[in-house]
Image (cartoon, helix red, strand yellow):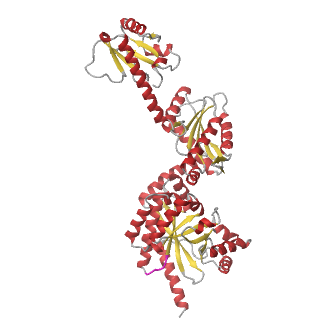
Amino acid sequence: MSASTQSMALVLLADQPAWARRLRACLAAAGSRQPLLVAEDWDDVRERLDGDQPCVVLATPSQRPLLSQCRWPVILLLEQEPSETPEGVVDWLVRSQLSPEVLRRCLRYVRERCNLQGTLQRLAEHDPLTGIVNRQGFQAQLMAALAEHHGRGLALGYLDLDNFRRANDALGHAAGDRLMLQVVARLETALEAGDSLARLGSDEFALLIDTRRDPQRAEQLADQLVEALGEPYWIDGESLMLGCSLGLAHAHAGIGADPLLRHAQLAMRQAKASQGCTWHAYDEHSSRAARTLVDLEGELRRALRRGELELHYQPRLCLHSGLILGVEALVRWAHPERGLLPPGAFIPLAEESGLIVPLGYWVIARALHDLQQLRDRGVDGLHMAVNLSFRQFQDSQLLPTLNRLIGECGVDPRWLEFELTETAVMRRSEQVRRTMDSLARLGVRFSLDDFGTGFSSFVHLSSLPIALLKIDKSFVAAMHGDRQLVQAMISLAHNLGLEIVAEGVETEEQLRGLKQFGAHQVQGFLISQPLPLEELAAFLAEKARAPAQSGQ
């Protein structure tokens, strides 16, 4: 109802001809040139107006169109003043009170109300940053397009930007907004008249593509979009790459808006699983795997509530003393149908869905509880390492929640160790440093996980309260061909005053080489696979007996 009444046709639906004569006289006296269209009923109006032309309907009670038929403002024509306010109309006119001035004021009120409703509707249905339609507005557009075309000649694209959240965290929200405007500009350039673009979320878009003239146009457009969004972006003088994952779904007769949107989203998940900047078209067979991921997300939510998660612990061996100095907590999912799932089967999904934050708090709570259980069994001096995601690291409740959990479990926080990736500590470095300093004041220590796989500035690393560097298992595995890289990394850690933990140690040759280079600790299948709590307790007891027996 956003059109001005000055550009809207005036339509009269009345059972008495006197209303037409009276209204025309008032319009003429008010100096209005708006014509008055007199119709027999609403069906007659729809035939005589051009398509869905906006109009103001003046109708007597018996001729008033149903609310489901007419979306335009209705002015009710009455013979006397009503005892109650009529419902479903914007205003009413009483025959005895009708004059040119009253009619002029009534039409002005309708115009102002239409403009206000139009403004509110635009605010509700448009993204404030980009100005394009949002999820709510697009849903209405999609339903209308499917109804108009009977599900034919339309394709829906569901597009997800790759790495946008990471770029937004690194650059800050202001620069992230400028980046988003560049993305929208590229999308709009590729679209044609008859297409629609909507922003469904922070980094997700929908594209309604007109394929009536060319059934293959959606696939051709997908190639163009993937190429355009894969080009570098320039923000504050710096170049960065995003890329995208795009899913396509073709409409057909009888399909609804929600199923079509779901098909496009499933296809997008298929494209994202393929890695890289690409697109995928929906088909029933290939999308079963994507539906499995959607189902798995729901199951993971329920698993958190039902207690289906458990922790296994991989010991870390000190190369100097031969003692187990620490363990790394690794989450497992005891799926009721698929068995025990490793982290790689569900942690990426948890990261994407946001479940990583509650899951992370569960891991911390369980690890602290189990650490206290081990202490009650006489196991002292054991560091508990827990992987901390960057999303959880940013959570405002991290410090108070950790304080509460430490108090509840009665664990000395000096034995708690958080493992952070190189990528995490390099993002929003000032915020990272402040959070790490606050945690360090509690006594918590930090290790840098997967060292060598990121882009760390060593000057930056030296300013952070990091106690250990963990060499990624890929470098350890490559030692049989190139030992110099691992040796250089260990030497660098010594110069920084940091301890070195080598991951993925599986052979005696690797163990000897790491000991020779000066690594402090190792973990891997050569030492032990990750163990449930009871098996870990037995393993530690056996390790504690071995030195005692050798000393007798």
Q: Which residue reaches farthest bottom?
A: 552
Where are the magenta residues, as a range? Answer: 378-382
What predominant SS class does the magenta segment belong to?
A: loop
Residue 87 percent location from the top left of the image: 33, 24
- Residue 257, x across and y down, in percent: 51, 35
Residue 379 belongs to the span the image colors magenta = yes
Residue drawn at x 43%, y 81% as measured from the top left: 378
Task: Give percent across and percent down for residue 485.
Answer: 70, 71
Q: Position of residue 141 (x, y in %)?
A: 52, 32
Q: Is residue 68 visible?
A: no
Name the residue furthest front.
Answer: 237
Can you name the residue that lies furthest to the right here? Answer: 481
Left or right: where 470 falls relative to 540: right
Q: Is residue 387 above or below residue 505?
A: above
* Residue 434 lies in the magenta stretch: no
Instruction: Tell me if 356 is positioned left or right of 233 in this view.
Output: left
Dividing the picture into quarters, in which one does residue 156 lie? Answer: top right
